[in-house]
Image (spheres, rainbow, N blue to C red):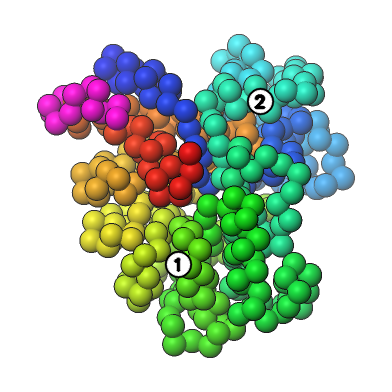
């Protein structure tokens, strides 16, 4: 909660800004939750509950969903200090009408029954987006996604390319590529993929990258670095920004829960991408880093390179104390037109509201302390900056209206 009256006033005004969410994992065919299990099966809760002592038995696919919900709720008392708990509490209060102070396993039946009733409404998806004040949501689409059966004005396609870069050697990926494009030859397939995606309204290309990856033009065309370089060439040709999510080390905790195995790695440096940034001055590289410790490096690259943009607060940096420090560093050093303030990274629409509200509260406090009280900006100018971070830059960088 904000206890500063100026920040509270700014927060109220910032909440009136209709959002475009520039990165999510939403399934446009099932965007909103159907049950409380859809909410609590989000990896943040399964990994936190497991870390706090819950075994993985309740997470098996054959477990009755209400039993899984009760098992996770029974561990809420161990994680109610975390920001992820506050997200769930805000979801329960805003969307389900929960009025209690502490969520526990005793609330399981009421929460599940209420969620089942409300989420069965045919306009639930619309209700969630309206309450969250979100107009558009960028997706994360597999390269062979037909991109059919959903509103691409509301759910904006984005070509995710991890499999093409890092799994092209796998027969199953080659088969998918051939089925989608008519060829296994990557040089012939990529133009077809980009044409397909852009014809369906795609506004970005995206990939998550390991800490030891260094793209260069000198590598073979079918090597990971070679495919990545060719993707950058197609981003230039088709005028798509390239979202780079840098530094994730997969399967660090090998016995972790689903999606709760990956961590960041301090060996990562943006110097590994210097050749890329220099070679493609016309491509907009929207960069997310996994650790707050790397934020200064990202700030410095965005400060110097016209084609490097700061993008959101990803994963393990998506904690208020890190967001606040990282946001301050960006606002003090990077041109305001080069910053994508926040994205949800959500898998279900209900998470858009608490996640963006967390960012909006932090943004309101930073604007109050660093810009208005210092006489740098008026309140009106501070709100204009907030609109740039939350909408204006997304519209311009990705070309959406």
Q: Which of these two is toward me, 1 or 282?
A: 282
Q: Is residue 242 magenta?
A: no
Q: Residue at x 54, y 30 (%)?
A: 134
> Which residue is depicted at the point 59% across and 50% down?
201
Image quarter of residue 372: top left
Q: Is residue 97 above or below residue 361?
A: above
Q: Position of residue 252 (x, y in %)?
A: 57, 63
Mark 1 lies on residue: 236
Label 2: how many residues lie within 10 Å, few (<14), some (14-19) or many (20+)? Answer: few
Q: Is residue 380 magenta?
A: yes
The label on residue 46 is none
The label nearer to you, 1 versus 2, is 1
**Which portion, as a residue range, is magenta?**
373-384
Q: Residue furthest left?
A: 375
Q: Secondary structure at mark 1?
A: helix
Q: Is residue 80 visible?
A: no
Residue at which label 2 appears: 126
What residue is rendered at 71% in x and 42% in y? 150
Tell me: 60 left or right of 336. right
Quadrant in the rendering for residue 294: bottom left
Left/right placement of residue 264 relative to residue 392 reads right
Crowd band around label 1 with a 10 angstrom C-alpha radius: few (<14), some (14–19), many (20+) = some
> On the picture, is 298 further left or further right than 317?
left
Q: Nearer the viewer, residue 197 or 298?
A: 197
């Amino acid at each position: 909660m904000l206890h500063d009256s100026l920040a509270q006033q700014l927060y109220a005004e910032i909440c009136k800004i209709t959002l475009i969410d520039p990165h999510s994992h939403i399934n446009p065919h099932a965007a909103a939750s159907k049950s409380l299990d859809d909410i609590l099966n989000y990896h943040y809760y399964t990994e936190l509950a497991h870390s706090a002592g819950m075994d993985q038995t309740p997470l098996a696919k054959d477990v009755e969903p209400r039993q899984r919900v009760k098992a996770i709720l029974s561990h809420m008392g161990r994680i109610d200090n975390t920001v992820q708990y506050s997200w769930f509490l805000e979801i329960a209060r805003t969307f389900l009408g929960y009025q209690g102070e502490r969520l526990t396993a005793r609330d399981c039946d009421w929460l599940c029954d209420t969620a089942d009733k409300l989420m069965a409404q045919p306009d639930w998806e619309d209700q969630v987006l309206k309450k969250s004040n979100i107009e558009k949501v960028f997706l994360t689409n597999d390269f062979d996604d037909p991109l059919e059966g959903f509103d691409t004005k509301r759910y904006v396609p984005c070509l995710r390319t991890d499999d093409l870069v890092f799994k092209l050697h796998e027969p199953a990926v080659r088969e998918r590529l051939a089925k989608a494009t008519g060829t296994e030859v990557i040089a012939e397939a990529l133009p077809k993929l980009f044409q397909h995606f852009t014809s369906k309204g795609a506004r970005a290309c995206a990939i998550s990258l390991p800490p030891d990856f260094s793209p260069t033009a000198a590598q073979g065309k079918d090597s990971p670095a070679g495919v990545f370089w060719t993707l950058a060439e197609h981003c230039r040709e088709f005028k798509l920004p390239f979202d780079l999510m840098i530094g994730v080390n997969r399967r660090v905790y090998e016995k972790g829960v689903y999606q709760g195995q990956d961590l960041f790695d301090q060996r990562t440096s943006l110097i590994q991408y210097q050749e890329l940034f220099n070679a493609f001055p016309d491509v907009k590289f929207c960069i997310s880093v996994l650790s707050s410790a790397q934020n200064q490096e990202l700030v410095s690259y965005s400060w110097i390179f016209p084609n490097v943009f700061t993008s959101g607060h990803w994963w393990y940096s998506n904690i208020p104390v890190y967001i606040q420090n990282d946001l301050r560093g960006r606002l003090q050093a990077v041109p305001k037109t080069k910053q994508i303030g926040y994205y949800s990274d959500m898998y279900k629409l209900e998470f858009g509201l608490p996640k963006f509200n967390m960012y909006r509260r932090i943004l309101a406090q930073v604007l109050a302390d660093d810009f208005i009280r210092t006489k740098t900006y008026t309140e009106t100018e501070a709100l204009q900056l907030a609109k740039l971070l939350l909408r204006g830059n997304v519209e311009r960088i990705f070309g959406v209206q």
